[in-house]
Amino acid sequence: EVQLVESGGGLVQPGRSLRLSCAASGFTFDDYAMHWVRQAPGKGLEWVSGISWNSGSIGYADSVKGRFTISRDNAKNSLYLQMNSLRAEDTALYYCAKDLSARTFGYFDLWGRGTLVTVSS
Amino acid sequence: EIVLTQSPATLSLSPGERATLSCRASQSVSSYLAWYQQKPGQAPRLLIYDASNRATGIPARFSGSGSGTDFTLTISSLEPEDFAVYYCQQRSNWPQYTFGQGTKLEIK
């Protein structure tokens, strides 16, 4: 089955760190760029970060630049998001998303169910 | 940052009617625009990419048009399962991909 499964979310205090993981299955993981997209409770979607198939191109939204680090391990079919210096405004459901094709970068055709990150004291 | 403004915020229609949703970009995104559908408690689903290409498995009643700064998602005849929130998203400006704020399509 083609799927993405996120894990690692939880309740964390402001200023602390958290690492999210995304396990991919059912497709050739290292053919595709991957992304993290988040959605604050009751709000819209926000692209957070993306990484090319070979980790050669990486980008971040301004809201997380310098605090979050995206990475991938193609041997383990896994995507990661290291989140440091967390703030209350980082509270959201974090989705892992696959890029549409090997030739595009920035459309998301497969999503996980998300993992909830709550930043609160 | 490219800002995407969707209108209307809420659209109230009945099954069988035609829905027209708009997305306007603060600067040209060429044709690098996608549309997503999100139902409560679910992840978004890609409907349209590159402004007018339907994603795999998307019914023909969904169509997209536009280029530059003005885009439209049209649902030709609404089915009960189409009532959801719709988002546009641009990939023109790496690494600053952005989404619109969403249009809620509700049953009248």
Image: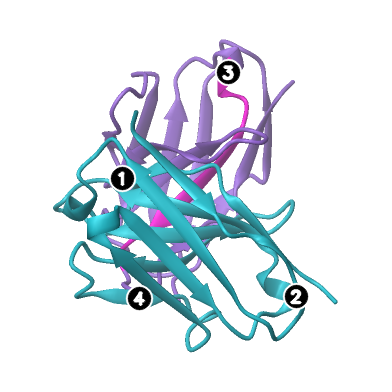
Considering the image in quadrants, where does the N terminus of chain B appear?
A: bottom left
* Residue type at numbered disc 2: Ala
Q: Where residue B21 sits in the image (x, y, percent)?
A: 52, 39
Residue toward you, A13 or A57 = A13
Q: Which mark is residue A75?
A: none
Residue B47 image point, x, y percent:
39, 35
Tell me the element at label 1.
Answer: loop
Pointer 2 with pointer 4, Cβ within 8 A: no
Q: Is residue B10 magenta?
A: no
Which chain letter matches label 2? A
- Can you identify the residue that label 3 sits on? B81
Residues under labels 4 and 1: Cα distance?
23 Å
Residue for badge 2: A88
Residue B7 as seen in the image, left or right of residue A105: right
Could you tell me the amino acid type at mark 3?
Answer: Glu
Judged by depth in the image, the label closer to the viewer, 4 or 3, is: 4
Q: Which residue is mark 1?
A: B51
* Tag 4 and tag 1 share a subunit: no
Quadrant hosting residue A56? bottom left
Residue B28 visible in the picture? no
Q: Amino acid at mark 1?
A: Ala
Identify the residue at image location x=69%, y=55%: A43
Q: Which tag, 3 or 1, sits closer to the chain's start?
A: 1
Image: A10 above or below B76: below
For mark 3, name the chain.
B
- Image colour assigned to chain A: cyan
Q: Position of residue B85 (x, y in %)?
A: 61, 38
Q: Tell me where residue A80 appears, x and y as whole percent.
A: 42, 65
